[in-house]
Amino acid sequence: MDNFRGLLTGIVLLLFNAILVSQTTLDYKDRIHPVVSEKFMVVSQNYHATEVGYEILEKGGNAVDAAVAMGFALAVTLPRAGNLGGGGFMLLFDAETKNVSTIDYRSAAPASAKSSMYLTEDGVVRYGHLVNAVPGTVAGLIKAHQAHGKMNLKQVMMPAIRLAHKGIPVSNDLNFILNWGKESLLKNKASKAKFYKDEEPLEINSLFRQPRLAKTLTLISQKGHEAFYKGEIADWIVEDSLTNGGLITKADLATYEAKDRVAVETNYRGNRIVSMPPTASGGLVLLQTLNILENFDIKSKGHNSASSIHYLSESMIRAFADRAKHHGDPDYYNVPVENLLSKSYSKEGSETIKENIKTPDELILAGDFKRADESPDTTHLSVIDEDGNAVSLTYTLGSSFGSGVTVAKGGFLLNNQMRNFSHYYGDDTAEYGKSEANKLDPGKRMISTQAPSMVFNSSGDLSMVLGSPGGGRIPNILTQVISNIIDHNLGFAEAVMAPRINQRVADDLEVETGISPDTINLLESFGHTTRPTNTMGSVQAIFIEDNKLYGVADTRRPDAIAKGK
Amino acid sequence: MIKSLFIIFAFLSSFILASIEINLPIIDYKSIHNPDISTTGMVVSQRKIASQVGADILSQGGNAVDAAVATGLALAVVLPRAGNIGGGGFMLVYLKSLDKTIAIDYRERAPSAAHRDLFLDSNGNYDKKKAQFSLLSAGVPGTVAGFYHALTKYGTMSWKQVLQPAIRLAREGFAVPHDLANTLSSTRYRERLSSNKAAAKSFYKNDKSLYKAGEILRQPDLAWTLEQISRDGPKAFYEGEIAKKIVKEMERNGGLITAEDLKNYIVAERNPVEGTFNNYKVVSMPPSSSGGIHLIQMLNMLEGYPIKEMGFGSADTIHIMAEVMKRAYADRSKYLGDSDFYDVPNGLTSKGYAKELNQNISLSTRTPSEEVFAGDPAPYESPDTTHFSVMDSLGNAVSNTYTLNFSYGSGIMIPGTGMLINNEMDDFSSKPGTPNGYGLIGSEANAIEGNKRPLSSMTPTILFKDNKPHLVFGSPGGSRIITTVLQVALNVMTHGMNVAQAVNSPRMHHQWLPEVLMIEDGFGSDTTALLKERGYKIYPSRTMGSVQAIMHENGYFYGSADPRRPSAGVASP
């Protein structure tokens, strides 16, 4: 009778699942699915920007045209992170040569900046003109376009100009974040006039026009790099800076250059992981973490089990400890990239990891890890065009809305990246911020955790284009997405939406909502102290498999969207 | 002096209070999933294009019922596997002006000639093919009558006006989404639909090739049918040209539905079932659906446990939920049927009964299903049904679930109408009293009888908070509908999730028999290991349900279209 029941059960179960369609493109085992397309795909954190990228690709532009167009568009439509007055990094994949190149357009220190200027009783200065670093975004976007774009600059910038000129309806999200941003924005006259009415944020659905920004963008579309770094716009920046206690001079702007760098890479279980090199330090941390993780059979431990999370946490800590000591602007400091990425070095690190027992903080090499934290507000976009060229681009103002300073005549915000140097270098009594590698020098770039990345599968084909905002959490966020796919074989959208953890040195294990209470209990029994956090990052990724493109826009930040054809 | 100090104090404190950052509920940075937001009203359905139809109706000044009917008719065109005019379902309507919720039962009715042995073969065994894919499987469709009833009694617009968008979509066509292209191309449905001449003509190209995602699908026969109904009302369906075509097909191919059956079809307006859960009021669908009763029964039982402390997704919580589900489904198999034909006991939704059942539940030990009640499981129900939710700015709400039963019903299309016919008759217990083969049998309560409605699990629901509609939702999923709706309700009421997080979170299911614990991906291996230790047979399931939900609070509408079934979407006026 029992056997009969068992048979009955079996048949019913077969029917439960058989009756549901088995998908080739869409897998009904996943709760959430990617956007699928065959020719091209665009993913960004902002609906308008995605539309712009899609439009450019439809008109015959290539991936770089689209990425550059989106970079300019985000300055208009996502003012807290999209920018002209900040800086960032990008990876470019050329489908014909199969080459990955990178552009470092991180913002840089003005010549006259000194660390003593930034230290106050309450810590490092946060807002205002003093913390503005020389912006790199325009240089970076123009450089990319000049080297690889197909369309002309005017065509590429037209959508952004149009959005600034015609205006966009204020979203719930923008209104909400402007409330949060009052602290820095209301202190600056131009920002206050631009984003607020009677000290209240722009109303939801009201039309947000930015005529000065439209003018700035038009000038750039006409005269390129020169317009921003030597011409009229440079004059506006300098005038605003010098009359308000800022440090940026004409010479600083004239000498700023976006730089080509050689990507860093490693092999993770047969997959080639490629990321941004210093000045971006996130790439190194990501690769190092994966190198350490590779020593363990993560697949067998199950996705988001206490065991998996434990190994992630332990690997992350070791990779991060090195960051504090060794990462800096490679034009000023010799970053030991080869050593850091050597498999033997990582194996050594992995040998100090115990199964199911958290390594006490004191045993991790004391590193300079508690530096001024990078804001979670940065933004990433990913693009693949019809020919298979790809761009992975992350850029930022630093904090949301950067320094809060709007260049009055230019209509754009300036970053507050000067905060991110190790200003306490030389002060032995300081607890953190002492790293020599990242100390402030004239013209130097400060390190960043941004890590626009790409993955190639074991056949050598491009399989992932991804990146994320999230400050110090970026490399750990990407580690998990990559491991979710390679180790746990999660669906593409599931891999991005799955709850994440984060582990910094000498800190609690941060967990997003959605990790099982049973797993949390187990982790605590291993010696971890967990802490629930707000959601981490906003991964905008494209996955490629069997000649199809799968776009995934992270649901964590509103209005993120993928679109393809 | 003191007076001026007081004034200064009052001034200062109001200034301080004004600058305290209000924690706006709009954007929730703690949750991975976030709802769509609106202040003007909202429609959520399994096809964004159909949701937009509803939103447009709201923009034109229609109320929630106008929008719901328009969306339902549009779904018949753009979601042919479940959206329908050839099937039936259930609708809850809350009208602010009456401060009342009405339950509209437009479930299909068995043809008058139907009888309890209809699906037994000459050996007395259940004949699956007959029950599911022959014309005998068709019940008298209720959708057109149901929608017309709702619109004329509770809507404000004309029947013609709300039919317009659906007619346009059928005539001018719409871009085939991936989801539709996939189901039509899958072996199972392609075979079934291609073997029916009319269906093949509607859903495949002239050369029998497939529509690709993005191509335009036009359905001229369906447009004709909708135009007939628009011009002459439901009479065109139940007595006119369409009825004639249905009867002709029945006579030609051994179906039982007669002209009289069609003419005599009636919608039943009922009192909803109601319950409470902490400070919420739960309003849901009574028989001929079993959903409302068991939703409330399970909530009554769960109220007695510290679910929040036990935590979402922990083995402890899943265990309690499985135990509660077991008892509810055991009762369902014994007691539920069309209340117009069978006396469904009242006490199932009482707090006292729940308390009684709870006494046999242990926090640590699993109760084997035979110990709950020795009996036979209910017939298998198809997961393909569809739900949509509507709320307007006047405070009205509509929660509607309807279906053809299986995806694309029996695969039979009534020639000349562009309309698929349901195979709802299989939801009856085909052979009560005796177990046999796959013939999963239920009880007498749900035996086949002429004019009776087969038992359903559809659970369109509205939760009320402070006497106002707070959550409007429902789901497809066959027998899993009730547990899906239960979990979304708990996620909101107990776990405090926003509506998108509530909908997106992974789900489990237990239905007493077969005795397995079905779980979606996402609970983690530590939890499943603990459950296995307690003796649970874990079955990793494909995704369950497709919840389309709207939450209303503080003047905001928050919508969530379940990502489990692609192309679902939220639209607002």
Image (spheres, rainbow, N blue to C red):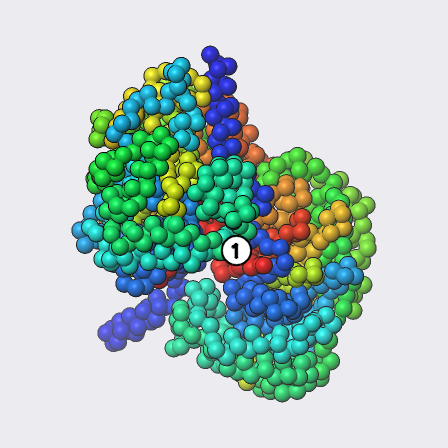
Name the one closer to the observer, A450 or A440: A450
Kindly give the residue lying farthest to the top in the view shown.
A1
Percent coordinates x, y for residue A509 in the rendering: 58, 46
**Which residue shows up at 24% across the image and 52% down it?**
B232
Dot 1 crowding, Cα within 10 Å, few <14, some 14–19, many 20+:
some
Vertical placement of residue B411 versus A452, above or below: above
Vertical placement of residue B355 versus B507, above or below: above
**Which residue shows up at 63% across the image and 81% down it?**
A220
For label 1, the residue is B215
Name the one closer to the observer, A374 or A49: A49
The part of the image, by quadrant, that contains residue B425 is top left
Using the rendered image of the protein, determine whether residue B41 is visible from the camera's viewpoint: no
Left or right: residue A92 compared with residue B26 = right
Percent coordinates x, y for residue B18 in the rendering: 35, 68
Vertical placement of residue A370 versus B2, above or below: above
**Which residue shows up at 76% across the image and 68% down it?**
A260
Using the rendered image of the protein, determine whether residue A563 is visible from the camera's viewpoint: yes
Percent coordinates x, y for residue B554 in the rendering: 31, 58
Name the one closer to the observer, B412 or A419: B412
> In what quadrant of the picture does the C terminus of chain B appear?
bottom left
Which amino acid, mark 1?
Glu
Left or right: residue A68 compared with residue B11 = right
Percent coordinates x, y for residue A141 in the rendering: 67, 72
The part of the image, by quadrant, that contains residue B250 is top left
Name the one closer to the observer, A544 or B463: A544
> In what quadrant of the picture does the N terminus of chain B appear?
bottom left
Q: Secondary structure at mark 1?
A: loop
The part of the image, by quadrant, that contains residue A86 is bottom right
